[in-house]
């Protein structure tokens, strides 16, 4: 049978209070994080060997980037927070040099802790997409990944030999980005492409895309479980 998806533990909330901009890199409307001792649980030190062995799970560190990119980080994290989709500790490396992202808009790396997201664009959907990779890896179990792949008719979750567009990990990140944009969708044809994408969003999160609300928000309740599916 197909087990219902369950929430992972809460990690990254609130958004604005949790973002640490390194000195000289804060957007105009957000203050630069005040320097704190390394031993403080509120600090993630970049480029230092001495780091708190148990850093606070509420800190997101942002390095480099334009004012617009840093504002988009705050906006994108807020979209996930408002939907009650919890994230791990993340480090964002921002640049406008395409070479930094190997010619792509961005990429997600979980090879070290904390996980890192590198972004070389000011396209907001790319911000939501790359954060979606972090959410999926942090939240979904292998069986849940397999359920999504089957539901969407894809080839694998993230097999290196699978074409990019046929990977569940990429489709799920696209689904989350689509569902968390703040542009309302007022009309949706049953069984049409938008309805199918919303079904995929619901399978991942347990609720319809906030975009289906007239004002682009969702009256989401903390602790709400995902939609359970069962075999016929």
Image (cartoon, rainbow, N blue to C red):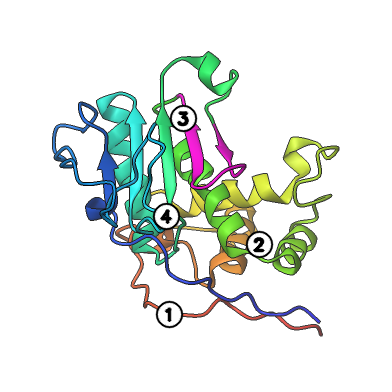
Which class describes the residues within 10 Å of circle 1: few (<14), some (14-19), or many (20+)? few
Circle 1/circle 3 CB separation < 8 Å: no
Which SS class for mark 2?
A: loop
Q: Give the range drawn in magenta.
A: 107-120
N-terminal of the pair, mark 1 or mark 4, is 4
N-terminal of the pair, mark 2 or mark 1, is 2
Single out the mark in the foreground, 4 or 3. 4
- The image position of residue 52, as x and y in percent, is 36, 52
Q: Is residue 90 left or right of residue 157?
A: left
Q: In this view, does 186 lie to the left or right of 101?
A: left
N-terminal of the pair, mark 3 or mark 2, is 3
Single out the mark in the foreground, 2 or 1. 1
Quick one: quadrant of the N terminus? Answer: bottom right
Q: In the picture shown, does residue 110 fall above or below 136?
A: above
Residue highlighted by disc 2: 191
Residue at image x 59%, y 44%? Answer: 110
Which SS class for mark 1?
A: loop
Residue highlighted by disc 4: 53
Disc 4 and disc 2: Cα gap in Å?
A: 50 Å
Which class describes the residues within 10 Å of circle 4: few (<14), some (14-19), or many (20+)? few
Circle 4/circle 3 CB separation < 8 Å: no
The quadrant where residue 95 appears: top left
């Amino acid at each position: 049978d197909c087990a219902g998806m369950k929430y992972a533990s809460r990690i990254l909330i609130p958004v604005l209070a949790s973002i640490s901009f390194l000195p000289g890199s804060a957007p105009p409307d957000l203050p630069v994080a005040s320097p704190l001792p390394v031993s403080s649980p509120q600090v993630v030190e970049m480029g230092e060997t001495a780091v708190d062995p148990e850093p606070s799970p509420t800190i997101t560190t942002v390095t480099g980037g334009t004012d617009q990119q840093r504002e988009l980080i705050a906006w994108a994290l807020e979209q996930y927070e408002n939907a009650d989709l919890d994230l791990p500790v993340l480090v964002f490396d921002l640049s406008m040099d395409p070479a930094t992202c190997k010619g792509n808009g961005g990429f997600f790396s979980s090879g070290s802790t904390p996980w890192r997201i590198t972004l070389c664009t000011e396209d907001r959907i790319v911000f939501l997409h790359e954060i979606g990779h972090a959410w999926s890896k942090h939240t979904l179990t292998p069986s849940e990944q397999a359920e999504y792949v089957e539901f969407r008719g894809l080839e694998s979750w993230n097999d290196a030999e699978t074409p990019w567009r046929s990977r569940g990990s990429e489709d799920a990140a696209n689904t989350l980005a689509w569902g968390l944009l703040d542009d309302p969708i007022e009309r949706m044809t049953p069984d049409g492409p938008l309805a199918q994408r919303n079904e995929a969003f619901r399978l991942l999160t347990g609720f319809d895309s906030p975009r289906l609300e007239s004002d682009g928000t969702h009256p989401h309740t903390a602790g709400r479980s995902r939609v359970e599916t069962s075999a016929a």
